[in-house]
Image: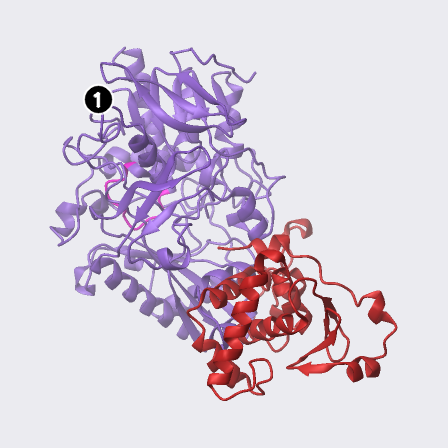
Amino acid sequence: MKHSHATRRPPLREPSPELAGISRRELLRRAFATGAMTVIGAGFIAAPDAAWAAEVTVITPEQMATLVQMARDTYPHDRIADKFYVVAVKGYDSEDNKAMVAEGTAALDEAAKAQGHENYASIGWEEDRVKVLQAVEGTTFFQTVRAGLVTGLYNQKDIWPLFGYEGESFSKGGYINRGFDDIDWL
Amino acid sequence: MVAKFDLNDDSVVVIIGTGAGGGVLAHELAQKGVKVVALEAGGRYLPEDFINDEWDSFSQLAWTDARTTTGSWRVHKDFAGLPAWIVKAVGGTTTHWAGASIRFQEHEWKALSTYGKVDGANLLDWPIDGSEMAPWYEKAETKLGVTRTGDRAGLPGNNNFKVFEKGAKALGYKEVHTGRMAINSSEYDDRMACQQTGFCFQGCKWGAKWSAAYTDIPRGEATGNLEVRDRSHVARILHDDAGKATGVEYFDKDGNLQMQKARIVCVAGNSFESPRLLLNSASSMFPDGMGNSSGMVGKNYMRHTTGSVYAVFDKPVRMWRGTTMAGIMQDEARHDPSRGFVGGYELETLSLGLPFMAAFLNPGAWGRGFTTALDSYENMAGMWIVGEDMPQLGNGVTLSETKDQHGLPVANVNFDDHPNDVAMRNHAYARGEEIYKAVGATRTFPTPPYPSTHNLGTNRMSEKAADGVVNKHGQSHDIANLFVSDGSQFTSGASENPTLTIVALAIRQADHIAREMSAKNI
């Protein structure tokens, strides 16, 4: 039960001051696409719609974009926005993980090439990316990222409402007067 | 006035561990005027400290010191360093337990006689039976305030129970109700009624669930006869040239090694730590560990044949609302070998929050097969299997090459399912899935066992000294002033959640110890 990423991950950055003045159009013009993410150069990746941006300081923006895509393909929830996957893998932007990420993402791209693609993140269909992930499923890199996501993704309180989960209830007096037995379809 | 005893006071009873066994024993002895020093490896947490958050609570309460695993059980693959989900805190796992409190069935005290010899199993009858235990069970039920015993009413059923009950009754099951629970259905013994909060596993913030942490421990301390030293990790039990226990060495909260003398030593650290301590106490006189002339210390580990069944429906259930385990179906608890296995199992309602569901629904799984299950979390219902598993010589605790923060070898836990365990689990999965399909489940999940919460048998009770570690009072066959006071003394696992039986045995053991002390036999 690894939950280290849940405790030591840095908070997701709001769009940085450097990006604040950039229009969406300018952002897109400067960028080149890597899957669903946009690498803006200079250590940043961002959503194409500028809904979020993340700064990387140790690993490359392309590596971070690959990690985010890999996170979504590993635990795909269509109603969960990319920014939550970014939070879940942001901790890999560190000296401790630099080598693992470099080797792991390179191996992922190699596996993609072996299946006839340019690289992993640019593959269009999820099913095809999943086939690449299956090829590296036994690696320490994949298993480390996957295990970290179990807490790094699902322990983010902000996503709980998307699953209907209500979280803490003591402060609201429990459910004794709030529907512990309100099922009406049986 | 909380007692403070001298390290050189050799008149005290030292109890190691403060959970359902040690915490209750400490209280009962203190009430009888016996001086007790209880050494607890964990810290003190009370209802105001408990956290309605699965991972934060896990970090606060769970035993996460190093342990290692071997064997073919899936826990070794998925949670290699976490063979058990139990607690390191004053009150032990009574903070975390779900509260299910049911007595053994009569035949379960006589596992070997009832089931006969089972290949590969090391079955044995208990040296006690239901009639011997009946008065102690009644005392335990009164202490814990168990619902549906005495004149205490049952808990109301939550959404998860209503789904379970309707499905079970549709299949013709009769013994279906909201359980005998140590969770108050109305105010009892200065503890309030259940507020249907959920988070029973994270410590009850209302104190509606019985836990030694806020009942037996403070009441024992109030007698002036009990001193609890928290964050005190016992390293070894000491003995004299006559082979009698004389005290314990422990690391105090500052990490300093201390020695507490004792008239009697009682081990109650749950089924991994108790045998580990006896093995780590090996000496030239006892080269195989203390109390281990039988070679049974650490052997015969049982963890119940568990597993869960979750199901998704086309409409919301919201199973996390309300008491986590107030729901049981007991019709399959009987012994009926025509089902293809000996012993029986209970099905009990269970829910996990989203974070733990992600960790435990199918550990290691990924992709849409897994995530679409979680997408339907709100429409999920859940139940847990608790069945009797077979004691096996090869299953158990040995000393690992890994050392803990004090430099002591940690417990390695080896486990392989017995074919009887597998047959029972598969039967229970099938029945559980049928229960949910009878109320319209669109998808069901036979979920593998979690890290063990019911840890039993590693210092088992036996009539003959050659067959086990302790006698019918939990007293070492080898060393008269050494006792085992937790679930590790279980001879067989039975199909019931073990806490009520651990508590009943502890109350009974306190009676025995006090009597033997008065008679100057120990």
Looking at the picture, how far across and down is residue B397, in whole percent? 30, 42
The quadrant the C terminus of chain B occupies is top left
Rendered hue of chain B is: purple
In this rendering, position of residue B237 left or right of residue B363: left
Looking at the picture, how far across and down is residue A19, in whole percent? 83, 71
Any part of residue B396 in sight = yes
Rendered hue of chain A is: red
Chain label for disc 1: B
Residue shown at the point (71%, 58%) measured from the top left: A11
Query: Between B351 and A1, which is closer to the camera in this rendering?
Result: A1
Any part of residue A185 in sight = no
Residue shown at the point (50%, 77%) measured from the top left: B368
Residue at numbered disc 1: B285
The quadrant the N terminus of chain B occupies is top right
Query: Between B90 and B317, which is closer to the camera in this rendering?
Result: B90
Using the rendered view, name the quadrant where residue A63 is placed. bottom right
Segment tinted magenta in the rendering: B489-498
Helix, strand or loop for the magenta stretch, by majority:
loop
Asked if residue A82 is positioned above or below residue B180 in the image, the reply reads below
In this rendering, position of residue B130 left or right of residue A173: left
Three-letter amino acid code at disc 1? Met
Looking at the picture, how far across and down is residue B123, in whole percent? 17, 46
Please say whether residue A49 is one of the residues in the magenta stretch: no
Query: Between A57 and B128, which is closer to the camera in this rendering?
Result: A57
Residue shown at the point (56%, 66%) measured from the top left: A101
Label 1, residues with CA under 10 Å away: few <14, some 14-19, many ≥20:
few
Query: Between A173 and B35, which is closer to the camera in this rendering?
Result: B35
Asked if residue B436 is positioned above or below residue B482 in the image, the reply reads below
